[in-house]
Each structure stands twice: as C-alpha cells, then as structure tokens.
Amino acid sequence: MTALLAAAVAALALVPLGYIVTATVDVGWSGVAELVFRPRVADLLWNTTRLVAGTVAVCLVLGVGAAWLVERSAVPGRRVWHVLLVAPLAVPAFVNSYAWISLLPGFDTYAGALLVVSLSYFPFVYLPAVAAFRGLDPALEDTARGLGLSTWAVFRRVQLPQLRVAVLGGGLLVALHVLAEFGALAMLRYPTFTTAVYDQYRATFNGPGATMLAGVLVLLCLVLLLAEIRLRGSRRYARTGAGAARRLRPVRLGALTGPALLALTALVALALAVPLGSLARWMTTGTSAGLDVATLATTTGTTLALAAAAAVATTALALPTGWLAVRRRGPLATLLERSTYLGSAVPAIVIALALVTVSIRAVPALYQTAPVLLAAYAILFLPRAIVTVRAAVEQSPPLHDDVAASLGASAPSRLWRVTLPLLAPGIGAGAALVFLAVVTELTATLLLAPTGTTTLATAFWSASSALEYGAAAPYAVVMVLLSAPATVLLSRDARRGLTT
C-alpha cells in the first residue's frame, strides 16, 4: 500500500516532464525544428546561459569568500556577520529587483540582472560552504602551514578540494534558481527562457511555441543536473576515524582586517540594506502608498490559507515516500524518491503550463481552481518535506511499531497512536519549510490562481508592474516578515560553536 501511494506521488511529480515529452511527440520533429531552431531561441539561449554562468561564478566567489572569512579568519564579529550573510534569503529575488529598479530606473541591463540575482542567491553557496568548513579537520591545515605553505596555498591545495561537493551543490542550486527565475528578470526586462515562456503563454494561451520553449528550459535543467554529477567526481575526503579534537586557530588578517570588514559591509549593504531601505522609503514617502489595511489583511489571510493548505497537503504526500525510502530500502524506493526531486527541478512556469494543459484536457472543471494550484505547490516543494520526513523516520526505531502490532493494534491505530507522534518533529519542520516557500511563490500562482484570488506575491507583482511602488511596498514588507523565521532557522545551527 505504501509503495502504491509513493508511486502515485512520483507520478504527480513527473507530470511536467510527461507533458513536455507528449507535447514534443505531438508536434513532431519538423514542428520542433521550426519552433526551436530560430534566431529568437538562439538569443534567449545566449541570454540565459550567460546569466546562469555569470551568476554562478559571482555567487561562488562571494559565498566561498564570505564563508572563509566567517569560519577561518579572525575577522571581528563573526557571529553577527554570519546572520547578516544569511539574511538576504528572507528577501525574495523579485522584491530585491523591485528595490533596485525603483531606485535606479535604468538598471534593466545584463549587469543589473547579474547583480540582482547574485545578491539574492549567493547565500545558497555560502551556507553549504560554511557547513563544509566546519566539518574540515583543522589538523590538515596546521600540517600544511607547518610545511611552509602560505594561507592562500592552504586554501587552494587543502581546503578548496574538500569544499568541492558543497560548492558544486550550492552552485547547482543557484543555477536552477536562475533558470526558473521569472519575477526579478521580468521586472528588469531581461529576456530569458522563463520570461519568454510566460509571454508566449499569455499571447497564445498555451500554444506550441510556449511548450517548445519550456522543453528547451527542461533540457537545460537536465544538463545542469548531469554536469554537477560529472564535476563532483568520485573522490572522497572523509577521515577514516574520529581522530583527536583539534581547536581551530583563526587566521590573523593583520593589515587586511580593514579591507575584509569593508568587503563584508559592502556585500551586506547591497544585498540587505538596499532592498530594506527601499521598502522603508516607499512605505513612508511613496506617492502611491495609500495603504488599504483591509485589502492587505485580506490578501495576507488568503496567502496564509493557501500556504497552510499546501503545507498540509505536501507533507501528507511526502509521508509514504519518506517512509518507503527508509523502511523499504531498494532500487524501487530510490527511484520513487528521486523522481520527486527531478519533478521539483523543473521551473515553476513549466509545472504551471503542464497542469493547465492536463486540467483542461482531463478535468476542465478543475481549471483555475485551488486543487490545481495546490498540486503545483506540491510538485515544487515536495523535496523540502521529504527530506525532513525521511530524517524523522530514520531516527524513529521500528521497534515501537512492532511492539504495538504484537499487542494487537491495527495498522491505522499504530499509524495514529505510534508512528505519527514519533514523526511529528520532522513533519512539522517539513510543513514549515513548505509554508514559508509558498508565501513568496509567484510564477505558478500567477498562472494557476483561481479567478479573484490574490496573494501577497501576486498583489505585489500587480502593483509593481504598474510602477505603483508605494502600493507594492506593504505586500513586500509582509512577505519579508513572514520569511524571516526560515532565515533564523537556517542560521541558528551553523551559528553554534562560532567564536567571536
């Protein structure tokens, strides 16, 4: 029964890929060639690939550099810097874009897009780099210095190879987010495949042009996934034993302390102070800032209701997959679990496009209804719930369930009275992650939200697109406030053990 439920969840997650494959077969090779091999697609490919490559490069430099300063140097205030460097995750990328474009109207260039998305996504590299630094054995670095290697040589020859997996994983996250980004780039008028798919959909209502562009976008996602696996390699850097504890001795920066503090200050100012300052400015002086408290409250209530429903539904869907992956290990369980990750790697606009087509063709009554929107949220955010549920299952010994069964408890009774209470912390964590992700989701909500339904993200988008920056600011402020708890949770564990 559990396997059947997990298979159904995997089938839902793979709907977007199935839709793209089916649409491609229907169009035929001649149709695909006509729609894909044209100058417009070549321009989009160039814009998208150079933005992805540039953003990943900038985020790698910023993320790894900041992580080294916080974890390996004696720069003053490392705990404070750590929190400030994670905090930009509380500001959605499209809000960051709004802040910059409202301050600098001529910011709609490649350089502007590169700056905005890099400032929004560098924490995805910083966080795993910090975790990797904390897991490294300081003895190796001390030995290297004892052999006469400089600080730069120790970083390049000892630390960087051991950061390989973490840095590549963070770079992959950045690349996938840039591929899927719509709001920030549409506001900056920087055309990519995602913005082009949205424009095609609006112009031709799910015509073959939008579908083929979505297919190219999916191929780019798959290329990135395969490239990350290839670049990761098969080297292992783990120690064979626990070894003796060695206290870390931070590197003294000396005359470089001032420039290091200046660099961290500039990064935090650009990534955090600019968007928050822009929001504060428009909240107080925006000419269109006639704040309608009732509308804001209604929109916030709608957003919270959708987020709560999505959190419950997605976590419920994650339960059979997380349970199967731990209790019934094997090729089938692994395949079903990985299928959910592959589905979520597809950009939100492709998922929305697929669900629009499936709902219209299969059950027209479901088109633009809440269940379809919740299905999109589930496909997008299933991995967040599955990871936490799986961790909870691994920490829950099967002995309790076996004892309850030996005492005559039925399967539903064991589930309700034994299993779910043991899994409650993991279920709660997964639900919280999904909840916070849905609060700031824009693309799928724009395409799939029922008529008359407005969320904080779509209300912000509507006002900012009309250049009513003051009217958009309150919705952005509420989104940032609702996203702040997730930032605190992300920074809390890594902050433990840091010395000032």
Image: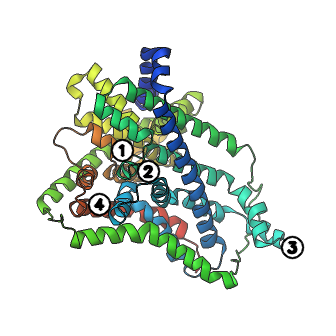
Q: What SS does tag 1 mark?
A: helix
Disc nearest the viewer among 2 and 3 = 3
Cα–Cα span, label 4 and label 3: 52 Å
Q: What SS does tag 4 mark?
A: helix
Q: What SS does tag 3 mark?
A: loop
Cα–Cα span, label 2 and label 3: 47 Å
Mark 1 vs 2, N-terminal side: 1
What amino acid is at disc 3? Answer: Gly
Residue 476: which disc? 4
Q: Quadrant of residue 211?
A: top left
> Residue at label 3?
148
Residue at 55% across, 60% down: 127
Mark 3 vs 1, N-terminal side: 3
Q: Please indicate whether residue 233 sits to the left or right of residue 446 in the image.
A: right
Cα–Cα span, label 3 and label 1: 62 Å
Q: Tell me how many marks there are.
A: 4
What amino acid is at disc 1? Answer: Arg
230 w.r.t. 65: above or below: above
Residue 426: which disc? 2
Q: Are marks 4 and 1 in contact (CB under 8 Å)?
A: no
What amino acid is at disc 4? Answer: Ala
Q: Position of residue 337 (x, y in %)?
A: 51, 35
Residue at 25% across, 53% down: 456
Tell me if mark 3 has few (under 14), some (14-19) or many (20+) residues whose alpha carbon lies within 10 angstroms of its own.
Answer: few
What amino acid is at disc 2? Answer: Gly
